[in-house]
Amino acid sequence: MANSGSVTKPIFPAQEKTLTERDLDWAVVRKVQAGNVGAFDQLVQKYREHIFSVIYNMTSNREDASDLTQETFIKAFQAIARFRGKSSFFTWIYRIAINHTMTFLKKRNRRRFISYEKIDEEVSNSEIFERLTANNRSEKGVLVSELQEKLNDALQKLSPKHRTVVILHEIEGLEHAQIAEITKTSTGTVRSRLHYAKQQLQSYLQDYIT
Amino acid sequence: MADTNNSHEKEVKVEDLLRLKRAERPGEVFWNTFDRELHQRMLQTLVKKDPWYVQVLRGVSGRIAQTAAVGAAAAFLALMVMRPALVDSTRANGANGANLALQKNALDLVNSAPSVDAAMSDLGSNLIPDYQIEAISGSITDSGYANEYSPDSFEVASYDRDVYAMDSVSLAGTGLAITLVY
């Protein structure tokens, strides 16, 4: 990938834009609440990839992530009549997803079945990979799969709370305030968890950091 | 300076590595399967029956709510019917107080007056012999009957009630009332 623009672009825009998104989502939610069940599909199409991404990075298992994402939407669908719009739909659905995944991880306990998603081919051409291969003797293809494994492994070493914050901020591109709202904590807690998690990751991934 | 900038540009940070994870995305085939499965599962939840314990719980809670509603309505109705009577009884409490005072006085009189036996002996010796004993409860032999139906009052003697002043003492709860003639 010549540039990493498509990869690094923020998934969720700034606060003002989110407010518009919030209004749009609320209009769809009202349709569903009024009985237009088909309108829920618009919300699924809009959020499925983000929800899947969060859950996948939390579990490092694509099959589990697929199941949990579906269950998240089913839970949201079942509860949508009670959704009053106090928070935005995206905060609400993210919260459902994270709570559901946390419950799953507690049940799963120490058993871990890794099943990775295929990395987009664009990434091997990204600027970051160019830098990585410049510092590393490994072949690019080998480096991609090796780094994927190391990254997932490092994330799984973090506690679920720290992992959540890192995923939401660094991968999903959410702001501290949004994460605080989703996780029902303060922005201070979010910053502190993020700082600690990054330190941990830095030590796990020091072979790749220059 | 340029070298420093170059070296900064070549640095790889944790954030850069984590952003690579955005590239772990499923393809179109995955999403097609995902959508199909999700629709199927959503339809299943729409037609799925609740587990038996949820149904039982719902039934019981419905029954409880129904009973509570009927009970509340009955209590309200009873209150509306009983209220005038309660108000009357409250008013009558003043009169009852007067009655109680009268009864207390009478009881005092009983205590200070000669005993029934003495009264009887007086009747025998001093009064005109055309007095007749009208009823004596002692004739009742059946104890059950006596407990249930023993007379609340008995007159020791009666004769020309207008001439003799009479006081009646009733002992609440004992089922005994004494009519005194003096």
Image (cartoon, coloured by chain):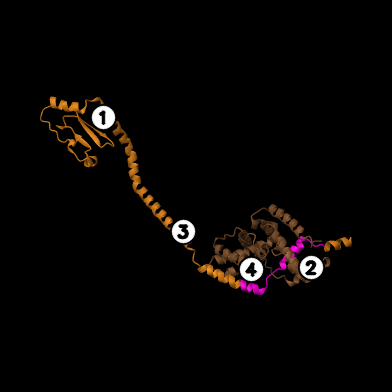
Chain colours: A brown, B orange
* Picture coordinates of residue A70, whole percent (x, y): 60, 67
Q: Chain of mark 3?
A: B
**Local SS, label 3:** helix
Corner quadrant of residue A104: bottom right
Q: Residue at x 76, y 63 (%)?
A: B17
Q: Residue at x 24, y 40 (%)?
A: B147
Q: Which mark is residue A129?
A: 2
Residue at image mark 1: B106
Quadrant (top left, top right, bottom left, bottom right) of the C terminus of chain B = top left
Say what amino acid the circle numbered 2 marks.
Phe
Would you call the spot at circle 1 few (<14 residues within 10 Å), some (14-19), or many (20 or more)?
A: some
Percent of width and height locating residue A35: 53, 67
The image position of residue A131, as x and y in percent, is 81, 66
- Distance from disc 3 to disc 2, alpha carbons, whole Å, reads 59 Å
- Quadrant in which residue B166 is drawn: top left
Give, as a single range, the part of the protein colored magenta: B11-34
In this rendering, position of residue B91 left or right of residue B22: left
- Disc 1 marks a residue whose amino acid type is Ala
Q: List the residue tagged with mark 3.
A: B57
The image quarter containing residue B106 is top left
Please determine if labels 1 and 2 lie on a single subunit: no
> Is residue A43 found left or right of B146 in the rendered image?
right
Q: Which mark is residue A63?
A: 4
Please identify, in this view, whether the residue under mark 4 or under mark 2 is nearer the observer.
4
